[in-house]
Amino acid sequence: MTEHEFTAELWRWWARDEETGGAWFFVSLPEEVADAVDDEAGPRKGFGSVRVEVTVGASTWRTSVFPSAEKKTFVLPVKKAVRTAEGLVEGGPCAVRLRTVE
């Protein structure tokens, strides 16, 4: 599959009340990357997700990107271990290398 590279802002989505569980952090895929991922994707998984392999800095992991009606693109969750290891902060830039996987 094709590898896509982009830089986007890390943003927070509050899944729950801050006092009871914290938040999720995401990066929104640029429109052209989202279109390419959509074209490359095989059968979708739960919630319309697409399996991907992601590299941010020295961290590489497998996850899924999810379609977001609100953002009108796919969104990539960025787990705490990666944010910590790579020094990522809310509102800051996140350089991503991404490819779809089966």
Image (cartoon, rainbow, N blue to C red):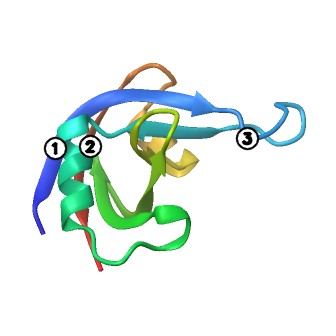
Q: Secondary structure at mark 1?
A: strand
Q: Quadrant of residue 13?
A: top right
Q: Nearer the viewer, residue 85 or 92?
A: 92
Res. 15 mark: 3
Question: Disc 2 versus disc 1: distance between alpha carbons?
Answer: 6 Å
Residue kind at label 3, given as amino acid type: Ala
Question: Disc 3 versus disc 2: distance between alpha carbons?
Answer: 23 Å
Q: Secondary structure at mark 3?
A: loop
Residue farthest right in this picture: 20
Q: Nearer the viewer, residue 17 or 32?
A: 32
Residue drawn at x 22%, y 48% is: 35
Of labels 1 and 3, earlier in sequence is 1
Q: Circle 1 is placed at which residue position?
A: 5
Q: Secondary structure at mark 2?
A: strand
Residue drawn at x 27%, y 47% is: 34
Up-down relation of residue 36 to residue 101 (above or below): above
Q: Nearer the viewer, residue 88 or 23?
A: 23
Q: Are marks 2 and 1 in contact (CB under 8 Å)?
A: yes
Residue 7 image offset from top left, x and y in percent: 24, 31
Q: Circle 2 is placed at which residue position?
A: 96
Residue 49 image offset from top left, x and y in percent: 45, 63
For this view, does 37 lie left or right of residue 10? left
Of labels 2 and 1, earlier in sequence is 1
